[in-house]
Structure formats: structure tokens, C-alpha cells
Amino acid sequence: MLKELKTTLEAISQWSAADQEYVHHILNQIIALRDQEPEDRDADQESYLQLARHGSFMKKLAGHFSSAILVDSQMGKFLVDPEDVVVGQYLRHSGTYSAEELSKLSAFVNPTSRVLFVGAHIGALCIPIAKIAGQVTVIEANPISFTLLQQNILLNGLKNCLAFNVAANDTDTVISFIQNRANSGGSKRKPIKDAFMYNYDKPNEIQVQGAALDVLLDGSFDIVVMDIEGSEYFALKGMPKILESCELLMMEFIPHHLINVANISVTDLVSTLSAFDVLTIPSLGKQVSGPEILNTLQMMFDQQLADDSLIFSKTTPRV
């Protein structure tokens, strides 16, 4: 971040005096906001607040009426929220996001693959995959992210991508949802147990429509990719038929999401995954099967070990 800040400051130094004065005004506003924050915050809280301040600065810099910035990257064209300093910033500055995860997933995809993305955000992962897959279906709960997702699908000329603005759930019901701003990809169903890491940027709370995917979607899929910030348990409960027919599930595993967002145990989560008998854990360089799936995930939970892309698969393909 320091390198990026130095580059930004060097660029600003070449601006006109009027533009530099405007940036100075914005920085003073951010400093004033910081002065209003409580002093008894810990280091973790401070890192989250820095993220929120960074997002606020970028939003002000883009202008009050700027809802998106166009990125023309190696992964495709993307409209990104100027306040998003995670996925949006990665795309703006490096032209890519989660390249390692994309590479892992691409290895399983071919021109006939039917891929379901549960939690597509603005499309940074699903759009590159749609360019090499046969059919892609995407689910996104956040209305703001969904609008950008739809626009990004159009920008990239994709005809094989079908999008739904719902929250994957175990039942068809309305759920409470928080819209994070500094990291919009971290938006999620309202946690059962609140924590500073979920509300540091004062997210809006809205109501979104939940849906059981076995009811919502027709047909079957070869691959399911899930990234829904703690709603995995509820989504998986609502899609047993999809899981039974697919060959591979890629899903993140974050212990504090199980504790706070879903308030479930590892055993609860694994109970929804009986369709799979092999688990690959990239972060540990390990593959386990059968009963060791539960034991290994419990170990990761106990040690607070997360993984962005667990891979659940089947030793015997199912039709």
C-alpha cells in the first residue's frame, strides 16, 4: 500500500494547483473522520478502519456522482465500485484478481462445462471462466454488485451467462443482508453474532430474497463455485440435487464465518456435503477422503485456518 500511495502522491504532484487543493480538502475530511473514531481500538480494528478510510477517500476522489470506474484488464472489461478497495482496487491496479484461484478452477473447465457460481460479486472470476466454459449460471445477492455484474456480462459480450439476483438459501424467504462498502465482496447475510470486522465501514442493512437453488434452477451442473461469506451452510442445504449431480465443488472455508455468521459447527457443515468423498486443501497441500474430511476441517477450525478454495470431489463420477 505504501508503494501505491507514493505513486499516487507523485502523480498528484503533477496536477494543477486547484486539483491539488481539492485533494488536500478530501484528505482533511478523512483526517477529521479519523479524529472522531474511538481511541481504544486494537490493531485489528485499526487495519479495518484504514480500509474504510481508503475506500472513503477513493469514493470522494472519483466524485459524488461516480457509481463505477471502468477497468480494461487482461481478464476482461469490468465496471468496479470506486469505494471497493479490495477486488475493485486489485483490478484497477494489477488488471487481475485471484489469479491463483482462477488458474485452479480453469484446469477443471472445458468448452462443454456447465458451471454454477454461487456468490459472483461483480464477475471477476465468473466472467473469465465464462469465456472458456459452455454455460455459466451466476447467483449474486447484493443488488449493487448484481447491477455491476449484469453490466460486466454485457461489456464482455457473453451470451452463455445467466444471472440471478437472489441469496442462495435453504428456503425461499427474505433474509437480512449487510452491504459492505470498502470490501463489497465481503457483503453477507446479517451475522447471527456481530463483530467489528463485519461492520467497520458502517454497511447498509437491507432485505434480500433468499431461494433454495434446487427449486430456482433447472438442469444440472458439472462444477459449483461458492463464495458467499458464511452462508454456505444454508445454501448447501437448499441444493442437495445440484450437489449430487455435480462433479466438483470449490468453496472457501473461514472459521469465524461458521462461528459468527451461520452459528454452526463443522459437523453441521460437513453434513451437507455427503455427495462428496474427497477433499483437497490447497493451502495445506493435502488431500483427504472419507471420515478424514470432517477430522481435517475440524482441525482447521480449531486452529483458525482458512482456505479460499477447498475442492470437494468424487472418486466415482455420478450421473
Image (tube, grey):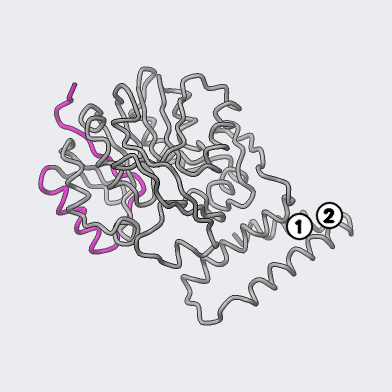
| Location of mark 2 (residue) | 14
Q: Residue at x 61, y 57 (%)?
A: 55
Q: Quick check: is 263 in the magenta stretch?
A: no
Per the rendering, the mark at residue 10 is: 1
Residue type marked 1: Glu
Q: Is residue 317 left or right of residue 127?
A: left
Q: Is residue 48 above or below residue 232?
A: below
* Nearer to us in this view, 34 or 298: 34
Give the quadrant of the C terminus.
top left
Residue at image x 57%, y 66%? 50
Confirm or deny contact between disc 1 and disc 2 (CB under 8 A): yes
Cα separation, mark 1 vs mark 2, equals 7 Å
Which percent across, then down, holds residue 290?
A: 11, 43
- Residue range corresponding to the magenta coloring: 290-319
Residue 282 image point, x, y percent: 30, 46
Disc ID at residue 30: none
Q: In the figure, is residue 79 to the left or right of 243?
A: right
Residue 244 lies in quadrant: top left
Residue 106 locus on image (x, y percent): 39, 30
User: In this view, which residue lies farthest toward the left?
Assistant: 291
